[in-house]
Image (cartoon, rainbow, N blue to C red):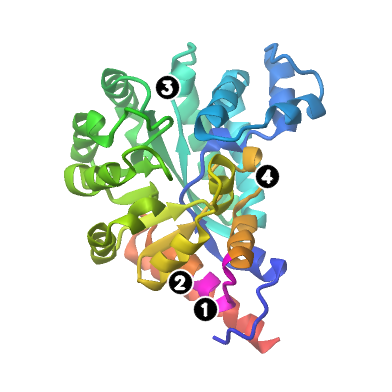
Amino acid sequence: MSSAIVPTPAFVSGLPKAELHLHLEGTLEPELKLALARRNGVDIGQTTVEQVKATYEFDSLASFLGVYYPAVNVLVEEEDFYDLATAYFVRAAADGVRRVEAFFDPQAHTSRGVPIEKVIVGYHRAAVDAGALGVSAELILCFLRDFSAESALATLTEALPYADRFIGVGLDSDERDNPPTKFADVFALARANGLKLTMHCDIDQVGSIENIRQVLEDIQVDRIDHGTNIVENPELVALVRERRLGLTCCPVSNSFVTADMKAAEMVALLKFGVLVTVNSDDPAYFGAYVADNYSALAEKAGLDTDELVLLAKNSFEASWLPTNEKQAFLHAIDEYVAGYSAE
């Protein structure tokens, strides 16, 4: 492959890629939020798309969550979850996404009386139907870390009858005073039931390095979400490289919740051989789907085409696909680049 290929937006969008850090609730575009509110008779305090867009403003993780969770009140019926996820899969397919391992937050819905069956079945139906778009899709059930460990255990217990419809469990929401080890027993039970493990280690949080250490050494996750602060501890960096554990980084969302995209840190980790991946996190709120994140990081860090292709290959390497399917997608990337080189 030649890095003389210009990494145009068209090249980036067409580049086969996996998205490993995507919150389905975070894909709720203002137009769909308003439509669902009307369909379900939910008063959200806004009556126009412009008014909804005006509420999507925040400058920290805490203020973002303060906007994010009230918005999910419009999701009530199984079809709502199906429609939300399907809208994302259509958009992802247009961005060259060939594999998605998407997060969902059942407690954000069960805590307001929505049965977990509606959540899981609705999202899973959309994941299955995504195959018709050329997208291989799986779900990751996330626990809200600012809820109790007992609530997480109850959620997992309630979800296990549907365990054939999600591939792993994760941990998200407000990290303050909610370390990974708070949920050690819940994640051990998930592991015992054959589920993969991942946890958010958000950027620039109090105790970031200790939380990363816990997920690596105590919980022994299969992947880390965000995790860019790991650059502060060379021993932990060496550990994730040795274990070939992916970091699911989100450049654009970083620039919203802190003052920095963390581009320099991502590039340093990439060049050290860590499986850095690029993802969109909550694209409806941050205004950037995954191809936009690739382009934003490339512009900020001056990445060439070779480095963007490496990031795309990392996304499949870090996925939870079987080895033979990973290899097929990696071959598809090589064919795509070769086709561009021949033009």
Residue that mark 4 sits on: 287
Q: CA distance from mark 3 to mark 2?
A: 36 Å
Residue shown at the point (60%, 51%) measured from the top left: 132
Dot 1 crowding, Cα within 10 Å, few <14, some 14–19, many 20+: some
Residue displayed at 70% across by 11% down: 43
Does 176 sit above or below residue 290?
A: above
Please say if the residues under marks 1 and 2 sit with CB atoms less than 8 Å apart: yes
Mark 1: which amino acid? Asp
Quarter of image, res 145: top left
Q: CA distance from mark 4 to mark 3?
A: 25 Å
Residue type highlighted by circle 2: Leu
Q: Nearer the viewer, mark 4 or mark 3?
A: 4
Q: Label 2 crowding class (10 Å Cα cut-off): few <14, some 14-19, many 20+?
A: many
Q: Is residue 309 magenta?
A: yes
Q: Residues within 10 Å of mark 4 (few under 14, many from 20)?
A: some
> What is the span of residues highlighted in magenta in the rendered image?
301-310
For residue 199, which numbered disc appears in the image? none
Compared to residue 20, the image places residue 58 above or below, namely above
Q: Earlier in the sequence, mark 3 or mark 2?
A: 3
Relative placement, left or right, of 13 versus 151 is right
Residue 342 is left or right of residue 69, and the answer is right
Per the rendering, the mark at residue 334 is 1
Q: Which residue is mark 3?
A: 107
Residue 154 in view (yes/no): yes
Please state the horizontal and vertical placement of residue 159, each as a whole percent of the image: 34, 26
Helix or strand or loop: what does disc 4 sit on?
loop
Position of residue 160 in the picture relative to residue 264 (left or right): left
